[in-house]
Image (cartoon, rainbow, N blue to C red):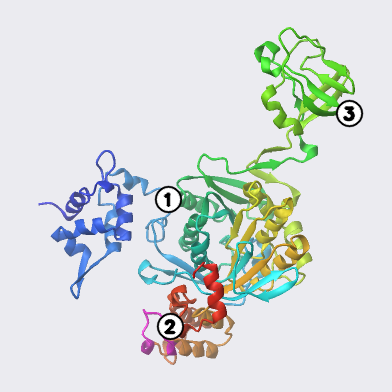
C-alpha cells in the first residue's frame, strides 16, 4: 500500500511543469505553485481522494484549499529526501522555526511607540539614546488589503518661489512621501514599476548592543529583521528598471546575512560588497576598532552597469604611449605606426599610417607643428599602443612630455574601474555628514548621517551617464540621497529623486534640507511632498504620544468603539479594568494597543477613494488620481 507521501509524489509528477530534465520533482517550483494556488495543481490534488481530504476543507459546499499545509509537506525532510532540491534549500537563511526566510510570505510592519529619532548609522556614541520601536509580523492570511495602493493627502509643491498646495503630480517633480515605507512602495508600483534606475537605501543596521535604535518588542531579532528587509527588497526588485542597480548601505552586524538574503532574492544579478572607510578614528569594539561599513551593489548579471570612477589629476599614472618589450616593433602592427601632431605643447591631431618605405625621424618639425613618431632613443621603429583607427578616442588622456631626445607622448587615464575598498577623507561621516547637515539645519537631531560624498559616489557610479534617471531611497532619513541627486545634477542632468520616510522628522529634517538645497543649487527644479492618508495610523500616532496609563486605556476604548479593530479580536473580550491588564507595564499596554488595530486599514486604500466613510476630499482625490494616472 502506498504511503501518503508516495501518493503526493505520484500526483505531482503528472504536472510536467514540476519536472526537471531527469524526471524528478522540482520542490521549489511545487512550493511556489502551492502558495499561489495554481489552478492546475489544485485540479490534480482534487482528483485524488486522499489528497483532497488532506488539503481541502468543505465549507458550506465550497472546497477551501490549505496552501500553507501543502507548502509544509513539500518542504518537509520526509518528502523526496534524496531530491537535490532538498539539499539546495538548506543553503540560505531560516527563521526561528527553521523555515526559509526567502520563501516566507510574512509581512513585517514597523512603528515607533516612544518619542524617538531613527537613524541609520549607529556607533558607540549612540548609546545615550532611548529609542524603542514596535514591530508586528503578519502571516499571509492576515494580509488582505494591506498592500493595496493608498490615497495621498496634504500634497504641496516646493519651488524657488515658495510652497503651494497641488492637485496634480508631474514626472518633472521630485517626490517626498511620508508614510510606512512598505505601504508606500506598494503604492509607487502603480506609477514606477520597472522605471527606477537606482535604488539607494541605508536601512537600520540592527546592532546587538544597547545602541540599537531598532530595539523592538522582540529586540528585533535577526529573523524578524531579515523578514523586514525581505518584504521591502521584493518591492525594490519590481521597481528597478532592467538595467537598474540596487545599493544597500550596511555595517558588520547584518552584512553577511543581508548579502545571503539578497543573493536569494536576486538570483539573476551580480552582488558585490564594497568597503567604505567612513570613520578613520574608529569605533572601539572589544578587540578591534571599526573604521568602515559596506555598500552592497546589486547589478544585472554579466552586464557593465557601473561607470568609471574619476581619478584626481595628481593620482593619474602616466606611461609612454610608445610600446616596448615583446611584439612592440613597427612590423608587429602596421596600423600603429603614424605621427602624433603636437602644437604649442599639446596633442592636436594624428597623421596617416606611414607607408612601408617611409622612415621618419623621431620628431619632425613642420611649420608650427611637430610630428612625433613611435621611435625610441636608439632609433628603433616601434609602434603606438593604439591603432590609427582608435587613437582619436583617447586624445583627451594624452599629454606631451619633453625629454633629452625630444618630445614623447604619454597616456594617463583620468578614469578607471571602481575598486572594492573606498578610502578618502571625503567619506568621513562626521565632517561631511554631521557637520554638513548642521550647517544646513542647525537644530537637526541627527547625530551621524552619511557623508554626502559617500552617497554621491555610490549613486553617480550608476547614473552618471543617464541624465534622466530616477533614484529612489525608501529609508529617507535626513534626506542625504535627495541632496546627493541635486549635487550630481550639476552636470546638467534632469535626474529625479523619490524619498520615503515614516518618521515625524521628515517635516523637520528631510523636507527642509532638500528644499534648502534645491533653492541653493537646483532652483529650476521642484519637490512635491505628500502623505499617505492615515486611518488607523492615527491611533498609532496617539499611542506614540501617550505618556500615562490613563491615556493608553482611553485610546484602547476609542479603538474598541470603531469598526477598525483587528478581525482577530472581539471588542467585548477587551477589559481594560481587568487585573491582567492593569498589572501590565506602560510599554506592554502600548504594545497591546498597537496589536488590536486592524493593520489592513492603517491608511486609506485607493479602492476606497469614493467611499464616504473615509472622507477623502476632492483635492485629495484629484492629486491621487493624477499620481496614479486615473481618469
> Is residue 279 shown to the viewer in this render?
no
Q: Is residue 234 left or right of residue 13?
A: right
In the rendering, which numbered label is found on residue 92? 1
Q: Nearer the viewer, mark 3 or mark 1?
A: 3
Q: Main secondary structure of the magenta part?
A: loop
Extreme residue in the top direction: 357
Which-is-in-front pick, marks 1 and 2? Answer: 2
> Of 283 and 110, which appears nearest the observer?
110
Mark 3 residue element: loop
Look at mark 2 in the image and give the residue it sits on.
Answer: 564
Q: Earlier in the sequence, mark 3 or mark 2?
A: 3
The quadrant in which residue 441 appears is: bottom right
Q: Is residue 169 left or right of residue 415?
A: left
Q: Residues within 10 Å of mark 3 (few under 14, many from 20)?
A: few
The image quarter in which residue 199 lies: bottom right
Q: Is residue 328 above or below residue 311?
A: above
The answer to which of marks 3 and 1 sits earlier in the sequence is 1
What are the residue bounds of the magenta stretch? 560-573
Q: Mark 1 or 2 closer to N-term?
A: 1
Q: Please name the residue that numbered disc 3 is placed on.
A: 344
Amino acid at each position: 500500500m502506498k504511503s501518503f507521501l508516495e501518493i503526493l509524489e505520484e500526483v505531482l509528477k503528472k504536472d510536467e511543469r514540476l519536472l526537471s530534465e531527469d524526471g524528478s520533482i522540482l520542490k521549489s517550483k511545487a512550493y511556489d505553485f502551492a502558495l499561489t494556488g495554481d489552478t492546475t495543481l489544485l485540479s490534480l490534488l482534487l482528483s485524488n481522494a486522499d489528497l483532497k481530504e488532506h488539503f481541502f476543507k468543505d465549507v458550506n459546499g465550497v472546497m477551501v484549499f490549505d496552501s500553507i499545509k501543502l507548502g509544509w509537506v513539500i518542504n518537509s525532510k520526509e518528502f523526496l529526501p534524496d531530491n537535490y532540491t532538498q539539499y539546495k534549500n538548506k543553503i540560505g537563511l531560516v527563521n526561528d522555526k527553521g523555515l526559509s526566510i526567502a520563501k516566507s510570505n510574512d509581512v513585517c510592519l514597523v512603528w515607533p511607540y516612544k518619542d524617538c529619532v531613527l537613524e541609520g548609522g549607529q556607533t558607540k556614541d549612540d548609546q545615550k539614546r532611548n529609542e524603542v520601536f514596535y514591530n508586528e509580523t503578519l502571516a499571509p492570511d492576515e494580509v488582505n488589503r494591506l498592500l493595496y495602493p493608498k490615497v495621498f493627502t496634504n500634497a504641496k509643491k516646493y519651488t524657488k518661489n515658495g510652497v503651494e498646495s497641488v492637485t496634480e503630480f508631474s514626472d518633472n517633480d521630485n517626490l517626498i512621501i511620508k508614510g510606512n515605507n512598505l505601504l508606500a512602495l506598494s503604492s509607487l508600483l502603480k506609477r514606477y514599476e520597472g522605471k527606477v534606475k537606482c535604488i539607494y537605501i541605508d536601512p537600520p543596521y540592527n546592532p546587538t548592543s544597547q545602541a540599537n535604535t531598532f530595539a523592538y518588542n522582540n529586540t528585533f531579532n535577526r529573523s524578524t529583521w531579515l523578514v523586514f528587509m525581505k518584504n521591502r527588497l521584493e518591492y525594490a526588485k519590481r521597481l528597478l528598471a532592467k538595467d537598474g542597480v540596487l545599493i544597500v548601505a550596511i555595517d558588520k552586524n547584518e552584512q553577511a546575512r543581508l548579502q545571503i538574503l539578497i543573493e536569494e532574492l536576486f538570483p539573476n544579478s551580480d552582488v558585490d560588497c564594497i568597503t567604505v572607510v567612513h570613520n578613520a578614528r574608529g569605533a572601539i569594539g572589544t578587540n578591534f576598532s571599526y573604521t568602515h561599513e559596506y555598500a552592497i551593489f546589486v547589478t544585472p548579471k554579466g552586464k557593465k552597469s557601473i561607470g568609471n570612477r574619476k581619478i584626481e589629476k595628481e593620482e593619474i599614472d602616466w606611461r609612454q604611449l610608445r610600446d616596448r618589450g615583446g611584439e612592440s616593433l613597427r612590423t608587429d602592427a602596421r596600423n600603429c605606426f603614424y605621427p602624433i601632431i603636437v602644437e604649442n605643447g599639446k596633442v592636436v591631431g594624428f597623421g596617416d599610417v606611414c607607408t612601408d618605405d617611409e622612415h621618419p625621424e623621431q620628431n619632425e618639425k613642420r611649420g608650427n607643428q611637430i610630428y612625433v613618431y613611435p621611435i625610441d632613443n636608439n632609433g628603433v621603429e616601434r609602434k603606438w599602443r593604439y591603432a590609427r583607427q582608435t587613437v582619436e578616442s583617447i586624445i583627451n588622456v594624452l599629454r606631451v612630455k619633453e625629454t633629452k631626445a625630444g618630445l614623447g607622448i604619454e597616456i594617463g587615464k583620468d578614469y578607471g574601474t571602481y575598486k572594492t575598498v573606498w578610502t578618502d577623507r571625503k567619506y568621513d561621516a562626521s565632517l561631511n555628514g554631521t557637520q554638513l547637515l548642521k550647517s544646513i539645519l542647525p537644530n537637526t537631531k541627527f547625530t551621524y548621517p552619511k557623508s554626502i560624498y559617500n552617497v554621491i559616489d555610490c549613486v553617480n557610479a550608476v547614473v552618471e551617464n543617464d541624465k534622466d534617471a530616477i533614484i529612489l531611497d525608501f529609508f529617507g532619513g535626513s534626506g542625504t540621497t535627495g541632496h546627493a541627486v541635486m549635487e550630481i545634477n550639476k552636470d546638467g542632468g534632469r535626474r529625479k529623486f523619490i524619498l520615503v520616510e515614516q518618521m515625524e522628522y521628515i517635516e523637520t529634517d528631510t523636507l527642509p534640507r532638500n528644499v534648502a538645497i534645491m533653492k541653493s543649487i537646483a532652483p529650476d527644479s521642484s519637490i512635491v511632498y505628500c502623505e499617505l492618508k492615515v486611518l488607523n495610523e492615527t491611533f498609532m500616532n496617539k499611542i506614540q504620544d501617550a505618556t500615562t496609563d490613563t491615556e493608553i486605556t482611553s485610546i484602547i476604548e476609542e479603538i474598541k468603539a470603531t469598526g477598525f479593530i483587528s478581525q482577530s479580536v472581539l471588542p467585548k473580550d477587551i477589559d481594560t479594568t481587568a487585573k491582567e491588564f492593569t498589572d501590565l507595564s506602560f510599554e506592554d499596554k502600548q504594545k497591546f494597543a498597537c496589536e488590536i488595530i486592524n493593520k489592513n486599514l492603517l491608511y486609506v486604500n485607493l479602492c476606497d477613494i469614493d467611499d464616504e466613510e473615509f472622507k477623502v476630499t476632492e483635492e485629495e482625490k484629484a492629486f491621487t488620481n493624477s499620481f496614479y494616472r486615473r481618469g
